[in-house]
Image: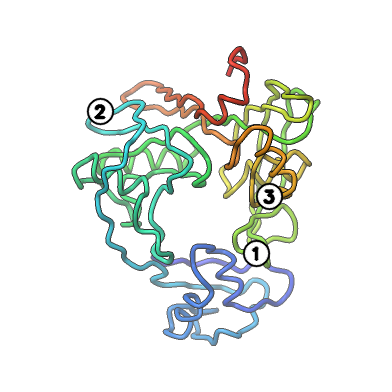
Amino acid sequence: MNYNFCVNIEKKQRVDMYISALFPQLSRSYVQKLIDTGCVLVNGKKIKKNLKLEPKSEISIDEITTSVEILPENIPLDIIFEDDNICVINKDPQINVHPTPWIEWKKWTLVNALLHHCRDKLPVISWEERPGIVHRLDKDTSWVILTAKNDTYMKDISAKIKNREVKKYYISIVWGVLTQEKFTITSDIGRHRTDRTKMTVSDSVNPKNAITHGEVLWYIDEEYTVIKVDLETGRTHQIRVHLASIGYPIIWDATYWNPKVNKRAATLYQVHRQMLHALEFHIDLYGKKQLFRAPLKDDMKSIIPEDIEI
C-alpha cells in the first residue's frame, strides 16, 4: 500500500505520533520501523522518527501492510441471502470482520468463515487480508454485511459504496430521553490526538465533515431512547461519536461512554456490547434496487418491545 497526503495540523507534532494516530491499526513501534527503513518520506525526503511535522507538510508512506496467512474456519454464519455473486450475512457482534496483521488476531473472523463457506475462493482488492469484504463496521456492532464472491461484483459493489450509491440504516439504543423526533448532527470527525483508538469532533487529526440523521422510535423506562439512524457520510465510529457528542451515547459503548453508566445498563438489561445494529442495506444490483434486512440480535430484541415498528 502507498499513501500520499498533506498534514492537517495547526501545531508541530512528532511524525511517528501523527501517523500512528491516523492509522490506529499500526503500532507506534511499527511506524517507527517504517521511518527507520525509509518507507516514510516528508516533503520527498527521508526522516527521523522524532521529526516535528510542520503544517501542510507532504507525507508519503510505502508498504504499511504486511501479509498474514488466513485459513478457512468452520464458523457458523447467519446468511440472509446468497447466490453465485454475493453473500449477505447478519454478522454476530462477537466476531471481527477481518484479521489485523499488526495484532495477533488471525483466527475466528468473518473472513475465516467466508473462506470456509466459499471453499477458499474469494476476490480481493488491494487488501489481501480482507477477501470478499467490501464494507465493514466495528466488531461489537451487529449488522447486515454484503460480501462479494467474485472479482466483478467486488469491484462493482466497492465502487458503489465509494460513490455513495448505497444506503444503510441503523438501529441504536442510547442513554437519555431524546425529545427531538427527527434530528441531524453535522460536524467534523477526526482521529483523537492522544488516544489512537478514538475519534473526536474537536481538535482532531485529519478531520473530515460528517453528517448523521436520526429519528426517535421509542423510549425505554424513561431513561433510554431507541433511534433509527441514516448516515449521509461514512466516517470511522461516526454514529457512536456523533451521538455521544450531543449527550446521548450508545448503551454499553466502552469507548465513548462512562463505565459506571455502562454497568447500570448491563445490570438492567444484561447487555455487554454496544447497542448498535445495521438494519438495512439498499443497493442497485442486477438492474434493480435491492433491499437486504438483518433482524435484530436477541440482546437488542430483549430490550426493544416487539410492537415497535422498526
Residue visible at 30% across and 49% down in the picture: 112
Residue visible at 62% across and 23% down in the picture: 304
Regarding residue 234, the answer to whether it shows in the image is: yes
- Which amino acid type is marked by label 3? Tyr
Identify the residue under disc 3. Answer: 256
Residue visible at 64% across and 52% down in the picture: 255
Q: Nearer the viewer, residue 136 or 14?
A: 136
Left or right: residue 13 compared with residue 139: right
Q: What element carries label 1?
A: loop
Res 22 quadrant in image: bottom right
Identify the residue under disc 1. Answer: 195
Q: Position of residue 283 (x, y in %)?
A: 42, 28
Which numbered tag is attached to residue 83?
2
Q: Quadrant of the N terminus?
A: bottom left
Left or right: residue 149 compared with residue 161: left
Q: In this view, which residue lies farthest toward the top?
A: 307
